Image (spheres, grey):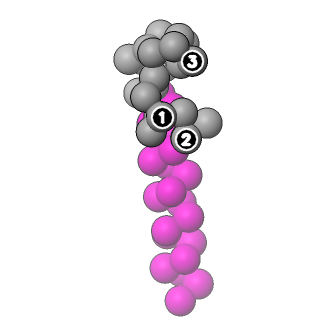
Amino acid sequence: MNLAFEIRTITRFSTRRIARKVEKISYSGDTDSGAPEETKRFR
């Protein structure tokens, strides 16, 4: 039970980190004008 919760939180954090990297690559730091709402939620 604890292990499953740990894996879930780890994957949630890693997807957030990946999304932040993708956001930087695709918008080149111009997040406020270019990024859709979905990517803004990850910050």
Looking at the rendered structure, the kind of residue marked 3 is Asp
* 15 versus 9 height, above or below: above
Main SS of residues in magenta: helix
How crowded is the residue under tag 3: few (<14 C-alpha within 10 Å), some, or many (20+)? Answer: few
Residue 20 in the image, given as x and y percentages of width and height = 51, 32
Which secondary structure, mark 2? loop
Say which of 33 and 29 sits in front.
Answer: 33
Query: Which residue is at 45% across, 47% downward?
Result: 15
Residue lying at the far bottom in this picture: please name it: 1
Query: Which residue is at 45% across, 15% downward?
Result: 34
Query: Which residue has dot 3 on it?
Result: 32
Query: Which residue is at 54% across, 33% downward?
Result: 40
Residue 4 in the image, given as x and y percentages of width and height = 49, 79
N-terminal of the pair, mark 3 or mark 2, is 3
In three-dimensional space, the C-alpha distance between marks 2 and 1, rounded to whole angstroms, equals: 6 Å
Looking at the rendered structure, the kind of residue marked 1 is Glu
* 43 versus 10 height, above or below: above
What's drawn in magenta, residue-wise? 1-21
Query: Which residue has dot 1 on it?
Result: 37
Which secondary structure, mark 3? helix
Q: Which dot marks residue 41?
A: 2
